[in-house]
Image (cartoon, rainbow, N blue to C red):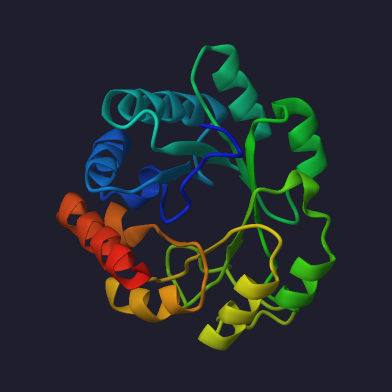
Amino acid sequence: MNRRDFDLSAYLVIGPENTLGRPVEDIIEQAIRAGMSFIQIRSKEASARQLIEWTGRASSVIAKTRPAKVALVVNDRLDVVLAARDQGIKVDGIHVGQSDIPVDVCRKYLGEDAIIGLSARTDQLIEYVQSVDPSDIDYFGAGPLHETATKPDCGLSPTGQVITRSLDELSELARLSPVPVVVGGGVKASDLKELAATGVDGFFVVSAVAGAADPYRAARELVTTWQAAKR
């Protein structure tokens, strides 16, 4: 999987703190079998060694299940991506925010084919997307659509207020963005018809799948609802 060939439509963000104690790789396998197309490993609590291990397990699951259809990235940790690759683990890229390692540095170390995603800041979102140099960025992650307990700092303004994104804003963002846009933040299946109508390229979820009693069923509902809405 490379930056010219990936499917952003059904995106799962997952780490051990999201799975209700179940193995990360088990949730990933169910999500992939249900049709989810993009996996991000994210944990603010895990060590580098743990992240490398979970990335390796995720990569193995993808290789056994849908190797040509699912992309795998790691959140924030360029060191983890590089170390995993050095160990022979197939990792397609990285997802960063504005306060993380700059995208040009990620591109320098990961190469021209790596997938690099960037979380667009919540204040002045549309202006930011119009002004940023997109040459090293392959997609934007935007949100939150709703407030979310999974990432309580998502969407914070400089004054600490959570700023959610309206459907009108997302329509404008999709129209103006030079790269694909994926939207998350408390997204549920009931949101997907309206979200698809904005023209964004996909949705991302955490607890809607990773915290579900039946991850396969939850993921399948999301995937089929999105696909029906985009027809």
Give the camera-side residue of 23 and 84. 84
Reply above or below: 129 against 49.
below
The mark tally for this picture is 0
Residue 108 horizontal/vertical position (percent): 80, 30
Residue 89 horizontal/vertical position (percent): 49, 18
Q: Residue furthest front?
A: 231
Q: Can residue 188 be seen in this view?
A: no
Is 163 displayed left or right of 62 in the figure?
A: right
Q: Residue at x 84, y 67 (%)?
A: 131
Q: Residue at x 26, y 43 (%)?
A: 27
Residue 132, located in which quarter of the rendered image?
Answer: bottom right
Q: Is residue 214 visible?
A: yes
Residue 67, located in which quarter of the rendered image?
Answer: top left
Reply above or below: 28 against 207.
above
Is 77 displayed left or right of 219 in the figure?
A: right
Residue 139 horizontal/vertical position (percent): 62, 53
Is 125 displayed left or right of 30 in the figure?
A: right
Reply above or below: 22 against 227.
above
Residue 230 horizontal/vertical position (percent): 37, 68
Q: Which residue is drawn at 34% across and 77% down?
A: 193
Give the camera-side residue of 103 and 114. 114
Q: Quadrant of the C terminus?
A: bottom left
Is 66 displayed left or right of 3 in the figure?
A: left
